[in-house]
Image (spheres, rainbow, N blue to C red):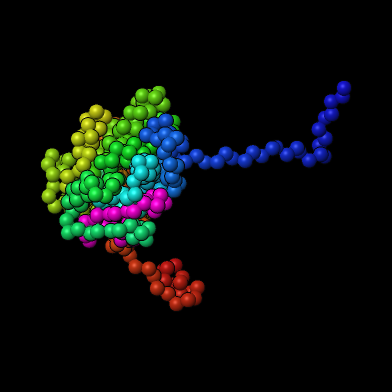
Amino acid sequence: MSTRRPSARRPAARRPVERSTPRPTLVERYRRFLPVTDATPALTLGEGFTPLVHARNLGRELGLDNLYLKVEGANPTGSFKDRGMVVAVSRALEAGARSIVCASTGNTSASAAAYGAAAGLEVVVVLPAGRIAKGKLLQALVAGARVVAVDGNFDAALRIVRELAERDDRPITLVNSVNPDRLEGQKTAAFEVCDDLGRAPDVLAIPVGNAGNISAYWAGFGDYLAAGLCSSRPRMYGFQAAGAAPIVLGHPVAEPDTVATAIRIGDPASWTKATAARDESDGLIEAVTDEEILAAYRDLARWEGIFCEPSSAASLAGVRKLVRSDRLGVDRDATIVCVLTGNGLKDPHTAEAQVGDVLGSEPTTEAVVAALGW
Ligand code: F0G
């Protein structure tokens, strides 16, 4: 038997190219941790699998080598709400619901409207009048949700929808984060962070409004630890807007006010869960001012190319504040993840107020060069 040497002149054998496997859905990927069974209708808009971006420029400014951003604005409706909504709406379908209802500062309604539309459900949304970012309101309306604006804040709207959901004459599922399926779905963000880092972070920094998300992340890290998929849990650092900081103050705020309208909440539904997450993790919940939020909002876009909504920037604003006052509580080489909860495109009004005018010019190259001051 002769062995043939490959001839130099013969073209190299082509390596077989394998087609990649289909992407799983979020619910499929983390099924074992979610309240779904074979009887739960499959529903997806492509939620989850959001980027974890290494923030090298902001990290350099703060002396933090391992600062990361979890970009939740990359979800289908532009916020983290989609993780919980896909589970809540699937489960509502499974239970035979015909309608879903929510109160919202905007993102929950945009998400409920989209998933409700995909599932063929009636969607009813109750909002605080005049305080919802334009993009979010339009998302709900374009998707066909029935939107009622009330002359009151989010806390009043939540009271109303809780009562609507209890009426016997109309079977309707409440899909705010007081629905446990929502928080179950939102845990998946913690799983992704651990999967992408190969470990749990040392600190998880997150904006706090109704306090569901901080509670969901904490539960998610707990699940991963219990399953042996990570060996530690992060310290949970929650940040409220100074004008809407009931947990920081220790009492409800009757008239919350902040440029970060998504977290303009005076009496969070998951208050106790959030303080448990804070205390069990040796973490903290503090306030950041609107100025600090807007500075972080601008710098995230200008230094890292990530356009998030103002509320989202509270996480970075909080970490910055702790670093600058020397209260970070972990070493500078610690792995810190700031959750950026929603997409900046939702709130063009706030963006407009932060930027200069476009430069005007005659339609010639010379005129554009002149306009640029080159
Ligand atoms: N960031 C954004 C962009 C939000 O929309 C919210 C909450 C939060 C942070 C706070 O999360 O409430 O779980 O503590 N938005 C809700 C809504 C209240 O109606 O869209 P939380």
User: Viewer-proximal residue, 80 or 119?
Assistant: 119
Question: In x, y percent, where is residue 100?
Answer: 31, 49
Q: Residue at x 83, y 35 (%)?
A: 7
Which image quadrant for residue 224?
top left
Q: Residue at x 23, y 36 (%)?
A: 274
Does residue 51 lie above or below 219 as drawn?
below
Report whether 187 appears left or right of 327: right
> Could you tell me if residue 289 is visible in this image?
no
Does residue 365 lie above or below 99 as drawn?
below
- Point out the stretch of residues depicted in magenta: 114-138
Classify the position of the N terminus by image quarter. Answer: top right
Report whether 371 appears left or right of 183: right
Question: In x, y percent, where is residue 217?
Answer: 32, 36
- Residue lying at the far right in this picture: please name it: 1
User: Viewer-proximal residue, 292 or 63?
Assistant: 292
Q: Residue at x 33, y 60 (%)?
A: 141
- Residue lying at the far front in this picture: please name it: 169
Question: In x, y percent, where is residue 129?
Answer: 21, 60
Question: In x, y percent, where is residue 52?
Answer: 42, 41
> Could you tell me if residue 276 is visible in this image?
yes
